[in-house]
Image (tube, rainbow, N blue to C red):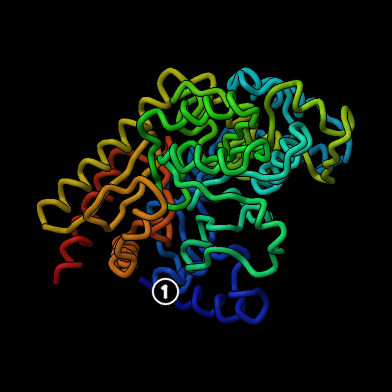
């Protein structure tokens, strides 16, 4: 595998950007390697600047559920570009997008478009605080809700990868308003609620965490969260930036039958462009300016190019919803089962957590059901495994604590090639 051009670009980037990248996990530090610089992508494949071709399971960290460069999305974006890039004024496509989001996720009665998942989540907790008149929030260890100050307390994603449980620059006074519970442990939530009676504005949760690796909710955990929030007048926020439109047409809340008060979205609704959104109950959302006093604005919010890409993606998902999600789940289940079989046959301890088109291969001999159990994974073994898969033409997330994503573009041939690469990598780990 040639890497000369990527190495040269990374060397140059190090003198121009912190760590040579614009988002921490991309630096490949967790896998003891240097990042590859990508030149182009199509369908399920990416090519780096050295001409190496890979089957891609990062999919831009989740947005590309239809694969790279989907013809309908590209065509729609090209047509939209002919009319300009941004106007700073309302457009028809924003209205169509809001209508479709509302149709697919019925708990969203009003929606506000923003530019990133971080912007969506920080806006949602500000809104919850205004609505309840309370200051404290509950989040879960290992759940990542973006890099806003309130969330960088035992966060997941890159903060886990780099071993940073919180971040300098976050005032202690603000961090003290964020309480951490354990995912899948409803008693830890109730304890915090009891100890901070009438002080909790919201509980924010990834219904299926993807930033400590994929972790599945169990024992009606989400339903019990809903019950606590109803009983204690707490706003329940589902961070569906990752799971929204990926696990089902209506996201994780449809899959698990739990209706949050507010939902945050991102990734898929941008079709590969920077987009976020938050929405929910009308009585809460009407507090957002200009309807109400909770201020939030954005120069590029709802920009027509991103809206066009997102709307085209969602329209395809909605129109093919009866088949597309079953097919994605079937491909992912088969892949996960074969991974387990091969690892077991070779005596390598792995846990493969999979739901819909998301999965994580944990190098662990125990069940992974929360942040603490995820951290027991063998990250050194994962790093070796990652680089072996890369050499065999498979591009995985460069961190033990991230999710793999499948797309409609992944073919049976891609799946079989990935399985063969996995078997080679597992055997090489033993040598």
Residue 198 in view here: yes
How many discs mark residues in the rendered view? 1
Q: Quadrant of residue 261?
A: top right
Where in the figure is residue 70, as x and y percent of width and height? 53, 38
Between 238 and 44, which is closer to the camera in this rendering?
Answer: 238
Q: Which picture quadrant has residue 241? A: top right
Residue 372 shown left or right of residue 128 in the figure: left
Q: Residue at x 88, y 27 (%)?
A: 291
- Between 175 and 91, the one lying in front of the other is 175
Kindly identify which residue carries mark 1: 33
- Is 119 on the left or on the right of 11, as rendered? right
* Residue 293, horizontal then vertical, whole percent: 88, 34
Residue 151: percent from left, percent from top: 62, 53
Residue at 49 percent across and 68 percent down: it is 162
Quadrant of the rendering where the C terminus is positioned: bottom left
Task: Decide: is 21 above or below 71.
Answer: below
């Amino acid at each position: 595998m040639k890497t000369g051009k990527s190495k040269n670009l990374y060397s140059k980037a190090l003198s121009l950007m912190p760590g040579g990248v614009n988002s921490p996990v991309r630096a490949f530090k967790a896998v003891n390697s240097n990042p590859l610089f990508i030149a182009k992508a199509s369908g399920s494949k990416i090519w780096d600047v050295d001409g190496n071709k890979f089957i891609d399971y990062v999919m831009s960290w989740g947005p590309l559920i239809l694969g790279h460069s989907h013809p309908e999305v590209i065509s729609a974006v090209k047509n939209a570009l002919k009319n300009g890039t941004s106007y700073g004024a309302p457009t028809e496509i924003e209205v169509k997008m809001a209508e479709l989001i509302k149709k697919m996720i019925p708990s969203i009665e009003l929606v506000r478009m923003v530019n990133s998942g971080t912007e969506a989540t920080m806006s949602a907790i500000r809104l919850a605080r205004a609505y309840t008149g309370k200051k404290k929030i509950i989040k879960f260890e290992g759940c990542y809700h973006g890099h806003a100050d309130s969330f960088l307390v035992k966060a997941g994603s890159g903060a886990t990868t780099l071993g940073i449980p919180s971040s300098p620059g976050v005032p202690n006074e603000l961090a003290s308003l964020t309480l951490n519970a354990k995912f899948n442990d409803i008693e830890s939530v109730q304890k915090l609620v009891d100890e901070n009676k009438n002080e909790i504005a919201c509980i924010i949760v990834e219904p299926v965490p993807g930033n400590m690796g994929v972790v599945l909710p169990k024992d009606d955990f989400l339903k019990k969260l809903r019950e606590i929030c109803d009983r204690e007048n707490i706003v329940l926020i589902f961070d569906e930036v990752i799971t929204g439109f990926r696990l089902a047409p209506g996201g994780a809340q449809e899959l698990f039958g739990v209706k949050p008060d507010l939902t945050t979205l991102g990734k898929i609704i941008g079709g590969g462009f920077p987009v976020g959104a938050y929405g929910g109950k009308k009585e809460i959302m009407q507090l957002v300016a200009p309807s109400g006093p909770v201020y939030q604005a954005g120069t590029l919010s709802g920009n027509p190019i991103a809206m066009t890409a997102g709307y085209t993606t969602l329209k395809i998902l909605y129109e093919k919803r009866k088949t597309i999600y079953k097919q994605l789940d079937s491909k992912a289940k088969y892949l996960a089962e074969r991974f387990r079989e091969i690892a077991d046959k070779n005596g390598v301890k792995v846990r493969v957590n999979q739901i819909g088109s998301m999965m994580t291969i944990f190098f662990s001999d125990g069940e992974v059901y929360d942040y603490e159990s995820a951290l027991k994974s063998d990250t050194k073994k994962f790093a070796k495994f990652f680089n072996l898969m890369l050499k065999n033409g498979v591009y995985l997330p460069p961190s033990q604590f991230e999710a793999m994503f499948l797309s409609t573009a992944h073919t049976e041939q891609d799946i079989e090639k990935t399985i063969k690469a996995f078997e080679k990598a597992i055997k090489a780990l033993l040598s």
